[in-house]
Image: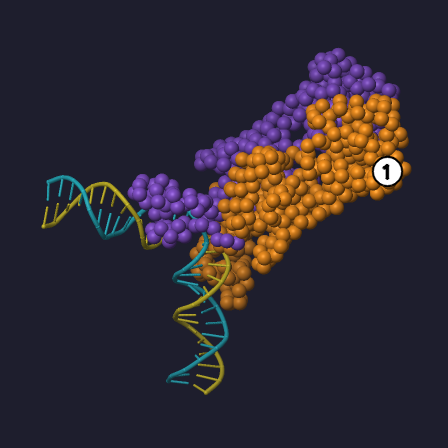
Chain colours: A purple, B orange, C cyan, D yellow
Amino acid sequence: MKKRLTLKLIAKELDVSVSTVSKALRDSAEISEDTRQKIKAFAKLYNYKPNIIALSLKNRKTKTIGVIIPEIVHHFFTTVISGIEQAANEKGYHVIICTSNNSFDKEVINMEILANGSIDGFILSVAKETQQKKDYHHLTEVIEQGMPLVMFDRVIDEINCDKIIIDDFLGAKKAIQHLIDKKCKKIGLITTIDYVSVGKLRTQGYREALKENNIPADEDLILKVEDFDKSEMEIQSFLKDKKMDAVFAVNEHFAIYAIKAFQEQGLKVPDDVQVIGFTDGELSKRFIPSLTTVNQHGEEMGAQAARLLIKKLENEDAEDEPFETIIIETGLVERNSTKR
Amino acid sequence: MKKRLTLKLIAKELDVSVSTVSKALRDSAEISEDTRQKIKAFAKLYNYKPNIIALSLKNRKTKTIGVIIPEIVHHFFTTVISGIEQAANEKGYHVIICTSNNSFDKEVINMEILANGSIDGFILSVAKETQQKKDYHHLTEVIEQGMPLVMFDRVIDEINCDKIIIDDFLGAKKAIQHLIDKKCKKIGLITTIDYVSVGKLRTQGYREALKENNIPADEDLILKVEDFDKSEMEIQSFLKDKKMDAVFAVNEHFAIYAIKAFQEQGLKVPDDVQVIGFTDGELSKRFIPSLTTVNQHGEEMGAQAARLLIKKLENEDAEDEPFETIIIETGLVERNSTKR
DNA sequence: TTTCAACACGAAAACGTTTTCGTAAGACTA
DNA sequence: TAGTCTTACGAAAACGTTTTCGTGTTGAAA
């Protein structure tokens, strides 16, 4: 490894002091025009760049954001990261990403490592295991230490910090309203049984939309999938002889299995029956027919998270300000599984 | 921000010198058992963690790997990252990820920032724009500076560094051989026209497999898609009245459009015609029928890249060692678009 | 009693910056 | 001529570590 150019080397080479070099490069008025020119020319010629680590140590800030997500091979999370990166870069920050692999231990370790000076603040979506364990000591520790923390998507109510979430309830409601606007009368729901915050809220949105339109909810049209691995079978048999004109599914996969089942019955999507999914991924875009979905706006979520965090980081008085919870509105992406 | 515990604070508190504290915590024999115990107990009680930035400055290594990829919302790249992270963490490294968004400028800027002390070495897949521009000054600069660089997937032949690539030629050949083993006689190819390194090599693999099996290549069975946006149409009309019993497509999307076209002709996949794609993504897994594909083994690619880089970082003599190019073998993932 | 290890610890330098403060030289004022 | 102000720069501290080297105190050997 060749040694990098430092202030000290420049100083020696030009026979001035380190302080002079530093000041010259930062255009201090203390330095005469002559010397300043000379030093700057030299620095430019040999492509001097200040050492970021030294600056971080000196300034006690790293201009780096730590992001911890449950998994990276996952469309939604990558869109969030993408948003974080853009917003962070705009403000001159960069981003360290760690995955917890949905493991509590790895989440704790990653946070500890990053908290030891590598970053100025956290953006986090907690691991499933953490949700189950309900052990949040690593989160409270970081907060007590005074390091800002923004949680997104999978947030924890008990933890007092800034949060960015989407409105699952409203998202589902909008989807159903859209179907109703398309003259659908019998709208099915395919949801999950245990995904509390997700399935439950989305189901509530479904019911609310029906209610507002004076359509009685028909429990026969609601399927709560018990076993994810057998979801295709469950959906297939559920959809048999049900005579619905639309289905809302709480994720991409259920939506696709529904379409498949309809097609096997000889029904055409969207002509005979329309389908809307939740979570807008690659699958929704490319499936044939492509899927109308509720978009979670991951990028915006990430961008907002980053901006909120940076606001806290750069605003000295921010410590006293109350924590915010920003709700990102969902959007409906119309594609070919619903009528135009 | 509360201030973190430092050696200096411990020293003051316990009325010893900073050096004593440091040595005690590192179990130096210079320190008496008594003081050592006392210091360690204190440190543990107040949860002392050494400041990583200070260590980085002192040791002039950060134990951090910089990764630059063209896009993060992309299944293949996320699998690579996943592999990098795992391998890196095993060796006590962590990972900073930046995306170039396929922009030359952003690639250059990101590299410059990271090279200024934040990281010990690079793992990189270049932006499309960089490939077009053929401007590699940022790569050579980093290398000259003595910072190790490992390129993966989209590598640049002219740059002299370690590389990890997959064997597109062999991957395609294996796919075709698989179809031939399944008694296919008339195998179509859907490829791209301009993707040099990718489409070309895979096409060569196709031809080679046919040749080895003494099947004459029929140019009528080869489609070079001209316009990605109109690929569905092109594929549809190409497949009309072609009477093939199998198709190999150089990516997921072409494969899916092919299946769709066959189905519209009333043909069944895989009973009447079998299909294999390249690049194993979410789409391949979830499409109905699920797609048999050539797997690029992104995780292994990432893991190998990380291991290779770390080897260079930790081996002092490594500078003299010649650069390696590791070829990751592709695998065939059998699913429902081919016969069992 | 002197000499000399061994022991246990502290001072200081180093990593690469920035910034505060001090000061020599010259210019200006009275 | 003496005093004061600029100007232009350097010394040193600081960020938090690690490590080398120096040194005062023991205890034991001579």
- Up-down: is A215 above or below A314? above
In this view, the residue in front, B117 or A81, is: B117
- Residue at 56% of width from left, 39% of height from top? B135
Q: Which residue is mark 1?
A: B215
Q: Residue at x 35, y 45 (%)?
A: A38
Q: Give the structural element (helix, strand or loop) at label 1.
A: loop
Closer-to-camera residue (A262/B177):
B177
Q: Chain of mark 1?
A: B
Q: Residue C1: x, y in percent?
A: 37, 85
Type of amino acid under label 1? Ile
Residue ID at (51%, 33%)? A90
Of the pair B192 and B99, the residue shown nearer to us: B192
Does residue B36 appear to the left or right of B197 in the view shown? left
On the rendered structure, is C29 left or right of A107?
Answer: left
Quadrant in which the C terminus of chain A is drawn = top right
Crowding near the residue tagged with mark 1, few <14, some 14–19, many ≥20 C-alpha atoms within 10 Å: some
Q: Position of residue A195 (x, y in %)?
A: 73, 32
The quarter of the picture where residue A263 lies is top right
Residue B23 pos. (x, y %): 50, 62
Going 61% across and 44% down the picture, which residue do you hit? B158
Residue A331 locus on image (x, y percent): 65, 22
